[in-house]
Amino acid sequence: MASVTEEASVQPGDGGAAARIAVENPATGETIGTVPSLAPDEIAELARRAREAQPAWAALSFEDRGRVLYRAQKWMVDNIERIIDVVTSESGKTHEDAQLADYGYTVGALGFWAKEAEGYLADERVPSWNNPVVAGKRLIIRYAPIGLVGVIGPWNYPIANSFGDCIPALAAGNSVILKPSEVTPLSSLLMAEMMHECGLPDGVFQVATGDGRTGAALIDHVDVLMFTGSTKTGRTVMKAAAERLIPCYLELGGKDPMIVCADADLERAANAAAFYSMNNGGQVCISVERVYVEEPVYDQFVAKVTDNVRALRQGAPAGIGSVDVGAVTFPPQIETVEDHVQDAVQKGARVLVGGHRRPGAGRFYEPTVLVDVDHSMKIMSEETFGPTLPIMKVPDAEEALRLANDTTYGLQASVWTRNVERGEALARRVEAGVVCVNDAQVNYSALNLPMGGWKSSGLGTRHGATGIRKYTKTQSLLVTRLAPKRDLHMFPYSRRRTKALRRLLKFLYGRGKRA
Ligand code: NDP
């Protein structure tokens, strides 16, 4: 049973008995806790505290802030069982899924940002030689903390995609308010407890539990918004941010294609297809959601994938190594999965494995492989976000590429071939923010490699320099040390000085050829 100290989340009130949200274990159907649903005035109070606490936090050195993050890293190591227990009980995912991403990603990220924040945010000197008006002056770019960061997260990775985005914001010297999904709030409350125990000053990191209305209220108070969730909500959130004229970064849905060339290592490609479509129950924004296989190896690939998927064990996680595929975390998601599979079957697809909701306790959908699919089917064009793998035969990689790009999404993609030069060339033609060659998803662990979607999959990136600078205000400094009493371009205008400036401009820029 999950255990979290709610008080550690610095809630201003309990929202009243009527405004509590029950948290369910999707693998068993049990209620495992309740959390308050914060009202707009309570969010305003959290924001007031956050703003009060932020200047002192920002005044600390990177090293001092980093020390708190390193302590949190150690806390995670010491509390691994408890963290995984909380994540698995509110999401219904397996221990391994919780350990790899929610735990493994976050424990690494705490140390990464503690170490790298200063380098990414250090003052930068830029040269002044490119225009005579500024020549010889000191030009400096400074990254100042933006103030109060709002993070709104989804339910599929209750720690990695929620608290994970708070870490660089904290390292940069901001206060943060995190609004987790109402379906999985306990993991965020546990992170608040951790940060409190590790010495983060009160008010610097707070969790605002509640539903979409709580998220909407949060946008009214923050200086920048980092949102992870569906494309539909992303649009709503961006409109609200536009009203307030605050920056808004969006990590949204995807329909990631996998392109398997005839010369691919089929064993690896088939293992990867099964894993990267079914891990976390397929509830991964960067899941393999559709596969295109070149004709000569199609039958062999389908046979291998089918064997792999058929062997998967599904059920309520009962400890390490007990099951491979967990539950469907979000109640309405199982209807989307069913709808996509039924729509495909009605339009002529064949189900080779699975294809049904599992009877009995908990919310499970069988790991499912489909063939004879095409782009008229929802399963090939809309985000399914479940344990499904539709596979399509294509004459060649050019056709695979055309189909891969035939989508409004552009989050990630993968290309599989033994010819890595060709693989990279194909990858550069896929319209997606990240493309892997002979791999998938693991780019997410490269914290120095930006990750973000093109098209309807998002705006902006997480990770790398841009993943922390988005939580800052850029300030440009121009410092003049030695200068005449009056510069050439200053008043009063005179014929002599205007002509002198013109000669200078001609000298500097007039020597090139026009052809
Ligand atoms: P939703 O868009 O439904 O919700 C995301 C968050 O927004 C939740 O906390 C939700 O609260 C909140 N919210 C809902 N309405 C509003 C509103 N009007 N204003 C402010 N906040 C609001 O997404 P899901 O939780 O269903 O997550 C699944 C989606 O997330 C998938 O599409 C997946 O692809 C995407 N995702 C993208 C990732 C990426 O990196 N690109 C990573 C992980 C997931 P509540 O839940 O309480 O209603």
Image: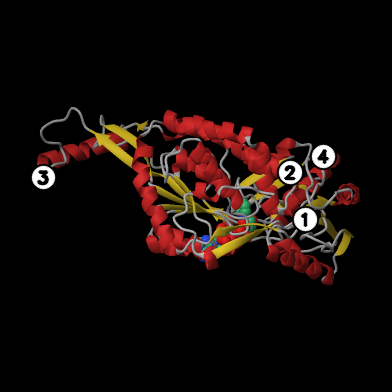
User: Residue at left 13%, top 42%?
Assistant: 490
| Amino acid type indicated by mark 3 | Tyr
- The residue beneath circle 3 is 493
Ligand 1 quadrant assignment: bottom right
The CA span between labels 3 and 4 is: 73 Å
If the image is split into quadrants, where does the C terminus sit? Answer: top left
| Amino acid type indicated by mark 1 | Pro
Q: Earlier in the sequence, mark 3 or mark 2?
A: 2
User: Which type of secondary structure does the marked residue at label 3 adopt?
Assistant: loop
Of residues 466 and 358, the one drawn nearer to the viewer in this rendering? 358
Could you tell me residue 100's position as x and y percent? 69, 40
Q: Earlier in the sequence, mark 2 or mark 4?
A: 2
- The residue beneath circle 4 is 268
Q: Earlier in the sequence, mark 3 or mark 4?
A: 4
Q: Closer to us: mark 1 or mark 3?
A: 1
- The residue beneath circle 2 is 95
Q: Closer to us: mark 1 or mark 4?
A: 1
The CA span between labels 1 and 4 is: 19 Å
**Is 359 displayed left or right of 335 in the figure?**
right
Q: Do callouts 2 and 4 mark residues in contact (Cβ within 8 Å)? A: no
